Image: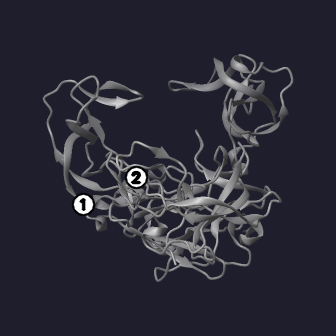
């Protein structure tokens, strides 16, 4: 039985034969869409016992706590196999507004649970009284637009709100690379200035309704709790709770740098500082080996350039050793060029000793439940959540996607690999697939299957077909981040012509508490 899994898939652009890799270093199951460093910086530290247990009752330090718990107005929406109680959090259902929502840190407002929004709120007049909406070329339509408007034009004040999209705009700017419009912007310390602007690459304009103010939505306050990590918990006005990020503790009880779950060099999962060092070079071409690195002045360690563990991106953390450089100025590679780097406020260093993995708090994963689909539960610093699923019949990771009839099917998430056919890694091929690091700590799939998906832009990906796969007989090679060419680090598979009925895939559903 394998013990690794891919997380829930998001949108992707094309029809192709694989789903998404969940073992990326920024780990998409990290809770919430908020900025953890900003979230963790607010609120007073509290006790972990202030959190809520998985059944909605007050939790205790004797067992894992749920990452999210429902309140009187916001109810959790949970995804899983039909009939299973082991489920992954999807989003919230706002019972007062009868719509789904998520806690999003908007441009100008604190965290509130709002439905999806996007585009730009624009104006057709230089006093910014007559508004409309615009969506940039290639962007997906959303039900709301976020922006500033005049709740009381006579008073001259401006306020934030969400404007519901009502339909196409008649008589608006012509779609194209440039158009004229106005927007309310801050000008220095003066808020709410109506300014002319050229609208670049907008191709859809919509009419929008009156603003819905922030007090129509459930707002949160951040409360920090500390065990090994500082956990930022968003507490809703209705009593709902959601972990929105973790930070490393700092001396004196302060909140340190934000951390996310990343795979360490030894293969374990650890909550590691997200900061990366800036390589510095002596010449204006940014060529050759770096002469030093730069990091914030108070950073005692840095994450080294990505290494590889079991064919997956992994990291290793080093202590910083102070360095001095004779070159002046020094340069950094950025935006496709090489530019002078201002060293003021930065610490210059070289890499020192590697820190052992146990320097950082470990996130543990295990399969839970029984039946044709099992859930993968991840526990970090006393909080547990389902981060993915496993097809226990075929022994492959899977994620729930709709089929052509709209039924959710636990679809295999094989990855197309960037393999090479020769030991020098000069002959690339995309003919092979693997199932990620699950095979590093468990047996190969007993009946590997690979899905063909339809991921039309701006719609949820759909599973079209599933085919049997067979172990590859051709030797393949992987290129490591440092350019080294090594034999393939995970078993490889090729797709056969034998189709598997979609009804063989377990069905799932989303339940609202």
How many marks the image carries: the answer is 2
Q: Is residue 238 visible?
A: yes
**Residue 210 in the image, given as x and y percentages of width and height:** 80, 36
Of pointers 2 and 1, the one earlier in the residue sequence: 1
Could you say which disc has been placed on residue 60 in the image?
A: none
Q: What residue is rendered at 66% in x and 68% in y? A: 70
**Residue 165 in the image, given as x and y percentages of width and height:** 79, 38
Q: What residue is rendered at 55% in x and 68% in y? A: 67
Quarter of the image holding residue 185? Answer: top right
Give the alpha-carbon distance from disc 2 to disc 1, as whole Å. Answer: 27 Å
Q: Nearer the viewer, mark 2 or mark 1?
A: 2
Q: Quadrant of the C terminus?
A: bottom right
Q: Is residue 509 left or right of residue 379?
A: right
Scheme of image coloration:
one colour
Q: Is residue 330 left or right of residue 85?
A: left
Q: What residue is rendered at 50% in x and 47% in y? A: 429
Q: Is residue 253 above or below residue 38?
A: below
Q: Is residue 308 above or below residue 126?
A: below
Residue nearer the viewer, 182 or 421: 421
Mark 2 secondary-structure assignment = strand
Mark 1 secondary-structure assignment = loop
**Residue 485 in the image, given as x and y percentages of width and height:** 34, 50
Q: What residue is rendered at 73% in x and 47% in y? A: 459
Residue at mark 1: 355
Extreme-right residue of the structure: 170
Quarter of the image holding residue 160? Answer: top right
Quarter of the image holding residue 226? Answer: bottom left
Residue at mark 2: 478
Q: Is residue 400 visible?
A: no
**Residue 40 in the image, given as x and y percentages of width and height:** 45, 55
Q: Is residue 211 left or right of residue 296?
A: right
């Amino acid at each position: 039985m394998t013990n690794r899994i891919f997380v829930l898939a998001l949108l992707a652009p094309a029809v192709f034969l694989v789903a998404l890799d969940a073992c990326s270093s920024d780990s998409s199951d990290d809770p919430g869409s908020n900025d953890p460093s900003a979230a963790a910086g607010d609120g007073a530290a509290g006790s972990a016992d202030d959190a809520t247990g998985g059944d909605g009752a007050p939790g205790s330090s004797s067992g894992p706590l749920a990452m999210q718990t429902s309140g009187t107005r916001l109810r959790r929406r949970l995804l899983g196999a039909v009939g299973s109680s082991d489920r992954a959090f999807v989003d919230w259902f706002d019972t007062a507004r009868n719509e789904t929502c998520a806690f999003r840190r908007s441009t100008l407002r604190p965290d509130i649970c709002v439905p999806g929004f996007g585009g730009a709120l624009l104006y057709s007049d230089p006093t910014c009284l007559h508004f409309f909406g615009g969506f940039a070329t290639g962007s997906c339509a959303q039900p709301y637009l976020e922006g500033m408007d005049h709740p009381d034009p006579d008073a001259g004040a401006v306020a934030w709100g969400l404007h519901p999209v009502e339909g196409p705009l008649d008589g608006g700017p012509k779609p194209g690379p440039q158009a004229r419009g106005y927007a309310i912007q801050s000008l220095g310390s003066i808020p709410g200035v109506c300014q002319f602007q050229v609208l670049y690459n907008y191709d859809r304009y919509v009419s929008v309704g009156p603003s819905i103010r922030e007090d129509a939505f459930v707002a949160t306050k951040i409360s920090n709790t500390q065990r090994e990590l500082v956990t930022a918990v968003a507490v809703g006005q209705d009593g709902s709770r959601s972990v929105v990020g973790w930070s490393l503790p700092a001396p004196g009880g302060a909140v340190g740098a934000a951390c996310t779950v990343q795979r360490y060099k030894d293969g374990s999962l650890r909550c590691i500082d997200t900061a990366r060092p800036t390589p510095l070079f002596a010449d204006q071409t940014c060529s050759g080996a770096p002469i030093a690195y730069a990091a914030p002045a108070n950073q005692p360690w840095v994450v080294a350039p990505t290494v590889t563990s079991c064919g997956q991106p992994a990291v290793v953390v080093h202590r910083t050793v102070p360095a001095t450089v004779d070159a002046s100025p020094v340069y950094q590679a950025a935006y496709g060029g090489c530019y002078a780097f201002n060293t003021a406020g930065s610490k210059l260093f070289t890499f020192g000793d590697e820190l052992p993995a146990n320097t950082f708090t470990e996130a543990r994963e295990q399969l839970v439940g029984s039946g044709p689909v099992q859930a993968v539960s991840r526990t970090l610093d006393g909080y547990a959540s389902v981060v993915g699923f496993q097809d226990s019949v075929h022994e492959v990771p899977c994620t729930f996607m709709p089929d052509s009839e709209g039924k959710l099917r636990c679809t295999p998430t094989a990855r197309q690999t960037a393999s090479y056919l020769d030991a020098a890694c000069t002959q690339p091929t995309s003919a092979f697939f693997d199932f990620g690091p699950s095979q590093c700590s468990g047996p190969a799939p007993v009946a590997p299957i690979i899905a063909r998906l339809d991921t039309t832009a701006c719609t949820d990906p759909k599973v079209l077909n599933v085919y049997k796969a067979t172990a590859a007989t051709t030797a393949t090679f992987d290129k490591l981040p440092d350019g080294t060419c090594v034999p393939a680090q995970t078993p490889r598979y090729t797709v056969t012509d034998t189709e598997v009925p979609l009804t063989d895939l377990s069905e799932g559903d989303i339940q609202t508490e």
